[in-house]
Every structure is written in structure tokens, then in C-alpha cells.
Image (cartoon, rainbow, N blue to C red):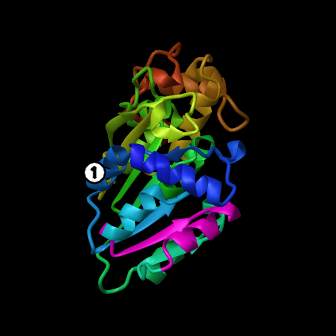
Amino acid sequence: MQNEYNNTKILMKKYGITANKKLGQNFLIDENVVKTIIEEAEVTKQDLVIEIGPGLGTLTQKLIEKAGKVIAIEIDKRMIKILEDRFVEAKNFEIINKDVLKINLEQLIKQNKKENIQKVKIVANLPYYITTPIIMKLLEEKLDIVSITVMIQKEVAQRLSAIPGNKKSGAITYAVYYYSEAKQILTVPSNSFIPEPEVQSEVIKLQIRNRPPIQIEDEKKFFKLIKLAFSQRRKTLVNALTTEEYTKQKIKQVLNELKINTKVRGEALTMEQFAEISKNL
């Protein structure tokens, strides 16, 4: 870790850089963590890797060595100069200075998936403040990717990898489970970063499914109901789902027909139960 710590300190001093709290910047300095991320992502020369938030380029350096091509998406203009200088000789590297949430990733992948590229993978140390919107974008857009290997806040990783209906579930748990198979890889201590975050981190891998685990007639409606159920967790499912569109009476009727307790909360329901409610409501 000492080598990367020294390299990071040198880069920060040379370019007059301090971590931007608003952008959730914590620079990774643990070489073993970098190695684990690369190994778990199974990066090869036949891969196009999209890295989100490369920062000073600690993970980027190893990705460039292993991948066919690396596209780094970085919102912070200060980092662009550092990355350009650091990887000036890398022929398989491209930087995009934009907000990843505003990029047409489907188009980007189509433009770069050439003959020598067989698979597209997302690999990143994600900014914690924006983890959920990024993960949801990657999943909901049904991109031509095989996996997402990212470092995120441990508490969020537990929610992403929970089984729907588990106490740690959130609305995102159901989406992640529907689109991918989640696996927690490694807990990363705070001293693996400069500056040290106040929370523990976790490396997680989402292997994109070829087909969903259950068949849904109307995905939009299905996920809308789940979001409603979790938007007010303390409420019963009946109260949480009651809107102008769905009356309390109708919801109770559907739950009774499905033999689901009308006092249940959304967090206790399985994917299959939400699917049945969505189908019958």
C-alpha cells in the first residue's frame, strides 16, 4: 500500500489536488484491492472496460494493462489533465469529461465494440453519493454489458446483494435481483483511501442475467409498485400503494385473493408476490 500511497501523494502535490467532497472523492491507495477488483471482473484483452470516476487513475493503470480498451468517464475537469499526462502513451485509453448520468452509454458501447472486443464490463470505484442512480442507469438501460464490478459503501452493497424480502432489502434490491446476480467480494477498510471515508467500503460484482428470474407482464408497473411500497417503509403495503390510481379497497381485495396479509409491509414481500400483485392490480 505504501507505493500507491506515495504515488497518490506525489500526484496530489504536483497538480495541487485535494479531494472534492461534493463529488465524493476518496482516492484508492491499496494495490491488493485494485488487484482483487481486476481479478473478480475477469478483465482480458477481449474486453472493453468502462470505468466511472477514475480520479487519479490508480485502478485505471491496471485496467489499461489488462483490457483491450478502457474508456474512463470523469466529471471532474481537474482529473482530466492528470489522466491525460499519466496515460499519454496508452493506445487503448480514452477519457470522456462528462457526467455519466447524461451519457448515451448504449451508443458509446456500439461505437467501441469492434471486432477485437467480445465483452463490455463496467469496473469502478463509484462515488458514494451517486451510487444508486448510476447502478439503476446501468441496469434499466439494458446495456450490452456482461458485468458490473464496483466498490461502493458497504451498507449499500448489503442492500444490493440482499435477497428480496430480506430485512436489508430496499427498492433497488428488487431491481438488482431482477437484472443480475449480485455477489459481495471484499470489505475494504477506510485506510485504503486518501482521504479516509467515514464508512466501510465493499467490492461487489453484478453478473448480468441472460433472462430475468421471473416473467413480468409490465416491468414499468412492477417497479413502480415496488418504489411506492418502499417510499414510505413504515406504512403497510395497503397504505403505501393507495393512490388515485389504486384504491385501498382494490388493493385489499387483490391481497386477499393472493392470500397475502393486508397488514404486511412492502419489505416483507418476495419478487413473486410483487409480480402477482402487479398482474392483478
Residue drawn at x 40%, y 49% is: 3
User: Bounds of the magenta span?
Assistant: 66-88
Residue 276's place in the image compared with 261, above or below, is below
Residue 173's place in the image compared with 49, above or below, is above
Q: Nearer the viewer, residue 198 or 179?
A: 198
Q: Amino acid at mark 1?
A: Glu
Residue drawn at x 52%, y 35% is: 171
Q: Position of residue 7 (x, y in %)?
A: 48, 54
Q: Nearer the viewer, residue 136 or 227?
A: 136
Q: Nearer the viewer, residue 16 or 99?
A: 16
Residue drawn at x 45%, y 24% is: 168
Q: Position of residue 25 (x, y in %)?
A: 61, 46
Residue 265's place in the image compared with 186, above or below, is above
Q: Position of residue 219 (x, y in %)?
A: 49, 51
Q: Is residue 153 left or right of residue 129?
A: left
- The answer to which quarter of the image holds residue 102 is bottom right
- The answer to which quarter of the image holds residue 167 is top left
Q: Position of residue 192 (x, y in %)?
A: 45, 38
Decide if residue 214 is in sight here: no
Residue 178's place in the image compared with 199, above or below, is below
SS at mark 1 in the image: helix
Dividing the image into 4 quarters, which one contains the N terminus?
top left
Q: Nearer the viewer, residue 254 or 194?
A: 194
Dividing the image into 4 quarters, which one contains the C terminus?
top right
On the image, numbered disc 1 is attached to which residue? 40
Q: Is residue 214 left or right of residue 29?
A: left
Residue 219 in the magenta stretch? The answer is: no
